[in-house]
Image (tube, rainbow, N blue to C red):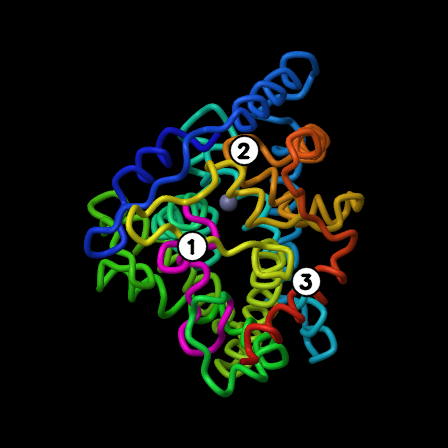
Amino acid sequence: MQDRDESQHSMVLEKEPTKKLKFAKNSGFQVELRRRVDELFQNSDFKERDCPQMYAKTAILLLVFWGTYAALVFLAQTWWQVLPLGILLGTITAGIGFGIQHDGAHHAYSRSPWVNQLMAMSLDMIGGSSYIWHWKHDVFHHTYTNIIGYDTDLEIGIFGRLAPDQPRLSFHRWQHYYLWLLYGFLAVKWHFYDDFNSLITGKIADRTYPRPKRGNLGVFLGGKLVFLVIAFVIPSLFHSIWLVLASYGLVAFVLGIVLSVVFQLAHVVEEAGFPVPIAETGIIENDWAIHQIETTVNFSRNNPLVTWLLGGLNFQVEHHLFPNICHINYPAISKVVEQTCQEFGVKYNYHNSFWTGCLSHFYWLRRMGNA
Ligand SMILES: [Zn+2]
């Protein structure tokens, strides 16, 4: 179900120095699920990619983004005008990541590689490297979801313990309170530290990856330059640098919280598994599809507004099973996935609302923070 790219990566990537991971052989479940989803597309008007709704959504998100940016830079005069505009800009920036860049990066937006590349590069415009993202997210996170030492999304340094096999420090006992606040700094760290650190060291967390060269390096550096011009240079032509820095801080804080919470609700909750490979063989007990389902949790499936704003990432189970299919189709696919899970006795995890997902993340953090 993952694209050929990722399967190939999964065959060659190693946890340093030599340990290779393998999933158990494809079970009948994976084959039957793929067959049913193929059938869904054959017998309906759904399109796997190039969905007209995606092009409309892209236009709306970019219009609101630039409209809000212009209002913030050229019109806002007082703090009570800056505050709501900054919150909206942070939220819409996350929406560009969820609704445009993410599909492009997974080749799920279009059949044309250049369209996918262009959409993936919307991340460079908002401050993150699309090249580093490909390795961190498409490869390390999607292939090895919730496996400690392989899924770099679980690595948050000493600040928190997200999984049972991570070391516990004494102050983690308060992590279910303070991590929510620290999530707000994710975007600033990403903009100014993580990408550059990965470029210099050749590592994402402690996983090695091929450093960007030529064109990819050009996009990396050009993207950072464009972002700096948008975020700092243009606003500072009209406002004091302190106001510009404060406004950037506000937008980045909102962006960090929205991004973090949406991703944590999918994998770092009480219902998600954190499987450990068999030490001698490096084999994961389940086949790849069942592994994805057991490590991933949906939320708010019946809320179309949430689905629209989050680019279908409230349907993370479907996203992890079919990352190369446009997210517009996830609600339809989820019915097939849930039914197939029921028939094969695979537990399909979901929360009815965003808030029950947040509570579950809170309880999981509390459990991991205590001995
Ligand atoms: Zn993804």
- Disc 1 residue crowd, few under 14, some 14–19, many 20+, Cα 10 Å: some
The mark that comes first in sequence, 3 or 2, is 3
- Mark 3 Cα within 10 Å, few/some/many (few <14, many 20+)? some
Q: Residue at x 25, y 40 (%)?
A: 12
Q: Main secondary structure of the magenta part?
A: loop
Q: Which residue is mark 2?
A: 322
The single residue placed furthest to the top in the displayed view is 43
- Of discs 3 and 2, which sits in the foreground? 2
Residue 276: image tag: 1
Tell me the amino acid under the disc marked 1: Val
Instruction: Report the front residue among 36 and 48.
Output: 36
Q: What SS does tag 2 mark?
A: loop
Looking at the rendered image, the disc whose residue lies closer to the viewer, 2 or 1, is: 1
Tell me what residue is drawn at x 53 percent, y 43 percent. Answer: 292
Residue 47 on image: x %, y %? 62, 21
Left or right: 338 in relation to 159: right
Q: Amino acid at mark 2?
A: Phe
- State whether residue 332 is above or below residue 269: above
Q: Is residue 219 magenta?
A: no
Q: Which residue is mark 3?
A: 88
Rendering quarter of residue 262: bottom right
Foreground mark, 3 or 1, reads: 1
The x, y position of residue 74, in whole percent, is 62, 66
Residue 244 as seen in the image, left or right of residue 216 = right
